[in-house]
Amino acid sequence: MDSKFYTYRFRIYPNKEQLAYLDEQIGYNRFVYNFFLERSINLYKNYGVKTNYHSNSAVLPLVKKGFSFLKEANSQSLQASIKNLDTAFQKFFKKQSGYPNFKKKGVYSSIVIPQRFAINNNSIEIPKLKTAIKVKFHRKFYEAVKSISISKTATGKYYVNMLVEKFAFTPYIPKKAIGISTGIDLGLKDFAIITTGTSINDKESFKIPNNKYLIKSQKKLVKLSRQLGKKVHRRSKQDKTTASKNYIKFKNKLSLLHEKITNQRNDFLHKLSLRTVNDSQVVVLEDLNIKGMVKNRSLSKSISDVSWSRFADMLIYKADWSGRQILTVNRFYPSSKTCSTPDCGYIYKGLKLSERYWTCPQCGTLHDRDINAGINLFLEGLKQIGRVSPEFTPAEYAPAGIQSIGYSRHTMKQEACGFSRG
Ligand SMILES: [Zn+2]
């Protein structure tokens, strides 16, 4: 059967005893991974022998005898570590990468628990641990869980990752198109402008405001970065100054805030992209030149740009899951300059970035530039659904700038290059 695997990630809150247990298990897995990595490199370097999962796991019982502390380790997790190493090594053998890296303490690390776990209403149970670990399930899911892994971030937070299998299904598809436009300078308050509907006469446009907590954090980030710059620290490579205690304190504060912003942003974008994809058959986006935008821009603006490219990524893979179509419009397509009034289609070539509103000299309609752009993208989506009325075919409405993004992630990478982060 056609199926795909994907992962749900939830924060877990281990107590003191559980923390100690998880850290221990992470340590055992790191040890085993590094042990077999060294062994595999030696065998390959000195004898040309290519190890694999089976040859390594056959040796595991001997290693456990030699290092008695491994008795406390979950054997299935250790085997999973050897399997992960094998995946990395097979890539190396195929010359797709260099030797896999040794795992270091204190960086992002994880352990796989392939079997004998239980998922309760607000906790999980794992082998060898007598008590259940508290989990915050921030969303519902109904798929069966194939395996779980527990990860620890560099800042000491713990998550459970649940691998589930999604079966191919024929989704319910609403006959709606959505055009999403973002004015380059929508700013902090608003994130995007959306036009949604089923026909030229049945449509509505609205502004999507940014999450207000996110705005607050972003403002704080700008302030904190400024403060950090003033503390005593190295200004160049030649500079021998040691960073002050205050500098280190602010730097830690800043990395925590970055993490918070990432979480707040992802939460906002996940909800918005899910709603958008659920509501529509075709979503049309502008393929903005993110790389060009990030240059010479303020910190808070750069964050919005990154949000936009992340949002596009989410829309693309969520559309892929549920059989929706994403279209991107080439950034040279004049979506803000083209009059969106039916039967007009005038192109206002002289539109400046500073002009938020313009009046069409041909039909006299007053346009908000971003809403107008959203409507044009929406109309393009309708055209794809085949719902646009045959009378409405302005000559300038050439679909040349439109590219369709296929359902396979492979084509997505090639065509969505406009969204790559710079
Ligand atoms: Zn017009």
Image (cartoon, helix red, strand yellow):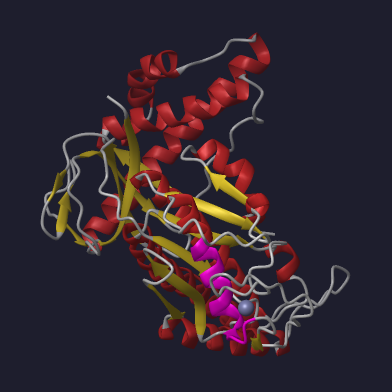
Res. 196 image quadrant: bottom left
- Horizontal placement of 137 versus 103: left or right? left
On whether residue 175 falls in the magenta region, the answer is no
Q: Is residue 217 above or below residue 343?
A: below
Residue drawn at x 67%, y 13% is 46
Looking at this view, is 96 or 368 the one in front? 368
Residue drawn at x 27%, y 45% is 171
Residue drawn at x 36%, y 63% is 198
Q: Residue lying farthest front? A: 391
Q: How many labels does the image show?
A: 0
Q: Is residue 249 above or below residue 74?
A: below
Res. 14 image quadrant: bottom left
Q: In which quarter of the image is ligand 1?
A: bottom right
Residue 181 visible in the current orientation: no
Q: Is residue 157 above or below residue 73?
A: below
Q: Where is residue 57 in the image (x, y as percent from the top left)?
A: 38, 19
Q: Where is residue 331 in the image (x, y as percent from the top left)?
A: 69, 62
Looking at this view, is 203 or 151 the one in front? 203
Q: Is residue 150 above or below residue 54?
A: below
Which quadrant holds the C terminus?
A: bottom right
The magenta-colored residue range is 363-379
Looking at this view, is 32 or 332 the one in front? 332
Q: Position of residue 150 (x, y in %)?
A: 32, 49
Residue drawn at x 38%, y 53% is 281
- Look at the magenta stretch and give its main secondary structure: helix
Q: Position of residue 394 (x, y in %)?
A: 62, 62
Which quadrant holds the N terminus?
A: top left
Res. 389 image quadrant: bottom left
Residue 87 visible in the current orientation: yes
On whether residue 375 falls in the magenta region, the answer is yes
- Horizontal placement of 152 versus 124: left or right? right
- Horizontal placement of 53 versus 414: left or right? left
